[in-house]
Image (cartoon, rainbow, N blue to C red):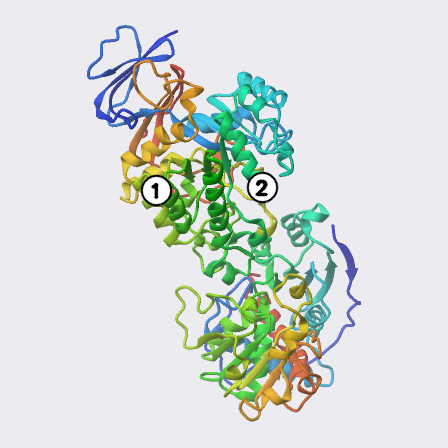
């Protein structure tokens, strides 16, 4: 039960083939069928994605900005939640690699609409999808889909669980400005408990050796989340409600979106209380390291979790995150398509 | 009626304290003799060498789904599942449609039971009309119609005043109020235990306090009213402590635990692979808790603080569980794995055999005063009903849900090897189930 919204017909483009992507030879190879979260990725695999993204960014800077590497590959986007930037970013990325793109919109839950997620996914596979990009409000939905299809599944966000491509584009952006993330302090501020962006960033940043601080009102913080079981990465994680202390010595400050429903649920006394204690402002950023990056996964509530001056200030890389998102998603689609059995 | 001899097993009867090698003779539907080398010329013989011979197991908590939810299970399929699982008596929970909130509804259920049931079925009436938590059911009618307890099952009586009156009125009728202790305002839309695993998986959780706050309130209401309170499926270490303390105060409080909560923790939802499984077959209410809770539940059974091991057998149609985790219904189909689950825990040394068998026979009988309905039930004494379960404790088998008699294949134990297999089950003197001895 999905409405089909065909992508614009692809103009045949002749562009230089993609070759000799990375300046440094990646030590890892990509063998994964699916990308469901960053928690299973090694530091080498993350490095491979980021290095491949460098090559993709170079493609984007060419006059034509696209290649034909994935000609004949069909990418289907299946979104059960509204999304502007993630979906557009995947579509642009797939088209820049010459893939065919089909966008499927499924409003509401699959159960509510009658067709089960499993049936929908099998149908999509049957029509010839190679890669399925999926967003869904239920945590674990991407894993469920991946178990029931031979298509490669890229998790475009599942409930409060994971948003791995966002985390990888965040790392890519950080690395371009900060360099090696080992030992760097990254502060993630806001509704961490309900944030798939925070979780996927945490696992990826820890694998890269960063020191992560999760900060926000105590009602919106995980009580136990620190490490993955059996996962002794080089990085570390701290959780605190003290923003002033968290910002001291920060190299990166990432604000998360605050949903108004948290106030209705009683998790916040009011937005005003949140703003008073946790809004990222230029004044508060003075405690961070000079040149610390300001990031936000979008869409921003300016004036709530982040002050407009901070959102658009000299330290802000929010727009660059969006730009980098295309290159990183190109890298992911490219790696996953080439890992698929022919 | 025929004569049946169960020969050469280890006869364990928690109610009488018997534990010795011997025979059990059943004549005319009742136990006529228990002892060494009984003479029974012409009797049908069940060879029980190497087996444990116990009173037929009693399950205080099963969802038989009929009437109203026959796609999940029927009286015929779910009582066959109970039978194969070694249970000779099950108490049918009232989350049916219609709910058993009046004598005609209970009589309708008992009529179907008489036609289809493979084991004894004792009805649990609903505490409130249509289990809506607003108006008390016709409690005296329910008692007369044969209900052994009242409960609103998965819809806890949230109003303290209403619960007080239920305990007062049911107590006067000798009915136990069996309560799913849960404070809904604390649970929100939680679909698993709130803790490290739920935070990692990004799932809304049910905090421990949702159960313990409700247990604490209901224990206080038990003291206030003098009515009998049975706490269904306790899952938390603190919950066990609260029950132990209530018993020390001399209050008429009993409780049960499920084999699932004795065997599994919230890690079962995540699965064992690095990629979280979001296993909907491990989604159950109340949720699987932590290892610390599990150890406290085991200790509670061994110490006798927990009166009964009850299955909370909850079959669902396969397609109902094949969906997103937060949208899947709660419940585990476990009638056919319950005994092997606890037998495996006995083998691991986590449960004591005597305490375990007590919690499957004498314990549940006393919790609901079932002897008032079926004299002698849950014992192997002369004159007791001929309900016997024969268990081969050493025999290993692998859980294959496709071979379940239950319509519900929703088990988190699929593919797991368990120890302890039901060899024979006798109900009312009739050999209803007999399994071939497997070659180990």
Where is residue A137 drawn, in percent x and y?
Answer: 64, 59
Give the left or right position of residue A99, taking residue B331 as reference. right
- Asked whether the residues under marks 1 and 2 belong to the same chain, the reply is yes
The answer to which quarter of the image holds residue B230 is top left
Residue to which mark 2 is pinned: B161
Question: Is B67 located above or below residue A193 in the figure?
Answer: above
Q: What is the tally of numbered marks visible in this picture? A: 2
The answer for which chain carries disc 1 is B
Give the left or right position of residue A80, taking residue B388 as reference. right
The answer for which chain carries disc 2 is B
Farthest residue to the bottom: give it: A290
- Residue shown at the point (66%, 58%) measured from the top left: A129
Farthest residue to the front: give it: B224
- Residue shown at the point (73%, 59%) measured from the top left: A104
The answer to which quarter of the image holds residue B245 is top left
Residue to which mark 1 is pinned: B248
Give the left or right position of residue A207, taking residue B387 as reference. right
Crowding around mark 1 (Cα neighbors within 10 Å: few <14, some 14 to 19, many 20+) is: few
In-front residue for pair B34/B15:
B15
Q: CA distance from mark 1 to mark 2?
A: 25 Å
Question: Is A309 located above or below residue B231 in the figure?
Answer: below
Q: Secondary structure at mark 2?
A: helix
Q: Secondary structure at mark 1?
A: helix
Give the left or right position of residue A336, taking residue B264 as reference. right
Crowding around mark 2 (Cα neighbors within 10 Å: few <14, some 14 to 19, many 20+) is: few
In-front residue for pair B299/B138:
B138
């Amino acid at each position: 039960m999905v409405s089909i919204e065909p992508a614009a017909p692809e103009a045949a483009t002749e562009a230089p083939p993609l070759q000799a992507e990375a300046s440094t030879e990646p030590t890892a190879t990509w063998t994964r069928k699916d990308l469901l979260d960053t928690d299973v990725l090694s530091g080498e695999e993350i490095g491979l994605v980021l290095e491949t993204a460098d090559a993709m960014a170079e493609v984007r800077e060419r006059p034509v900005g696209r290649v034909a590497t994935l000609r004949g590959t069909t990418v289907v986007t299946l979104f059960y939640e509204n999304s502007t930037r993630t979906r557009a970013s995947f579509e642009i990325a797939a088209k820049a690699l010459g893939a065919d793109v089909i966008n499927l919109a499924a409003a509401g839950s699959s159960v509510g609409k009658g067709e089960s997620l499993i049936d929908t996914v099998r149908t999509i596979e049957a029509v010839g999808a190679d890669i399925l990009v999926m967003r869904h409000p239920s945590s674990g939905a991407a894993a469920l889909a991946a178990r029931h299809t031979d298509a490669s599944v890229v998790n475009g966000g599942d409930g409060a669980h994971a948003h791995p491509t966002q985390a990888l584009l965040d790392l890519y952006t950080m690395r371009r400005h900060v360099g090696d993330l080992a030992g760097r302090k990254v502060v993630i501020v806001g509704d961490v408990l309900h944030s798939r962006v925070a979780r996927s960033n945490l696992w990826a940043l820890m694998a890269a050796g960063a020191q992560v601080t999760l900060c926000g009102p105590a009602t919106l913080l995980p009580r136990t989340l620190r490490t993955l079981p059996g996962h002794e990465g080089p990085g570390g994680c701290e959780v605190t409600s003290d923003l002033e202390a968290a910002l001291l010595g920060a190299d990166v400050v990432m604000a998360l979106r605050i949903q108004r429903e948290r106030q209705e649920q009683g998790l916040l006394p009011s937005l005003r209380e949140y703003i008073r204690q946790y809004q990222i402002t230029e004044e508060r950023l003075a405690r961070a390291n000079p040149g610390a990056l300001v990031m936000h996964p979008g869409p921003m509530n300016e004036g709530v979790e982040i002050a407009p001056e901070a959102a658009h200030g000299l330290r802000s890389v929010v727009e660059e995150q969006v730009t980098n998102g295309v290159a990183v998603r190109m890298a992911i689609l490219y790696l996953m398509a080439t890992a698929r059995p022919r | 009626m025929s004569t049946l001899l169960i020969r050469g097993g280890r006869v364990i009867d928690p109610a009488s304290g018997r534990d010795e090698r011997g025979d059990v003779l059943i004549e005319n539907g009742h136990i006529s003799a228990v002892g060494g080398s009984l003479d029974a010329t012409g009797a049908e013989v069940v060879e029980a060498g190497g087996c444990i011979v116990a009173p037929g197991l009693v399950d205080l908590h099963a969802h038989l789904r009929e009437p109203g939810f026959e796609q999940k299970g029927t009286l015929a399929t779910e009582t066959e599942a109970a039978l194969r699982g070694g249970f000779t008596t099950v108490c049918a929970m009232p989350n049916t449609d219609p709910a058993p909130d009046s004598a005609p509804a209970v009589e309708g259920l008992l009529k179907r039971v008489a036609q289809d049931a493979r084991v004894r079925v004792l009805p649990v009436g609903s505490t409130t009309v249509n289990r809506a938590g607003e108006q008390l059911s016709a409690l005296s009618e329910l008692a007369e119609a044969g209900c052994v307890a009242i409960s609103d099952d998965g819809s806890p009586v949230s109003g303290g005043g209403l619960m007080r009156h239920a305990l007062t009125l049911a107590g006067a009728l000798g009915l136990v109020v069996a309560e799913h202790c849960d404070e809904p305002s604390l649970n929100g839309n939680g679909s698993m235990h709130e803790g490290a695993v739920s935070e990692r998986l990004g799932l809304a959780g049910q905090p421990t306090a949702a159960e313990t706050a409700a247990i604490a309130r209901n224990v206080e209401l038990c003291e206030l009213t003098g009515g009998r309170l049975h706490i269904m499926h306790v899952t938390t270490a603190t919950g066990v402590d609260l029950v132990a303390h209530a018993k020390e105060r001399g209050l008429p409080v009993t409780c049960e635990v499920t084999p699932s909560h004795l065997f599994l923790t919230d890690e079962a939802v995540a699965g064992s692979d690095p990629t979280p499984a979001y296993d909907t077959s491990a989604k159950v209410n109340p949720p699987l808790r932590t290892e610390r809770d599990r150890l406290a539940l085991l200790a509670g059974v061994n110490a006798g603080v927990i009166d009964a091991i009850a299955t909370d057998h909850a079959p669902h149609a396969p397609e109902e569980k094949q969906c997103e985790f937060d949208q899947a219904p709660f419940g585990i189909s476990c009638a056919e794995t319950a005994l092997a689950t606890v037998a495996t825990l006995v083998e691991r040394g986590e449960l004591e055999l005597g305490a375990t068998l007590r919690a499957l026979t004498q314990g549940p009988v006393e919790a609901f005063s079932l002897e008032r309905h079926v004299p002698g039930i849950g014992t192997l004494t002369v004159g007791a009903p001929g309900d016997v379960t024969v268990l081969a404790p050493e025999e290993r088998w692998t859980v294959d849900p496709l071979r379940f008699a239950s319509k519900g294949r929703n088990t988190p134990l699929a593919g797991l090897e368990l120890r302890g297999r039901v060899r024979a089950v006798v109900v009312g003197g009739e050999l209803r189930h007999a399994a071939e001895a497997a070659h180990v």
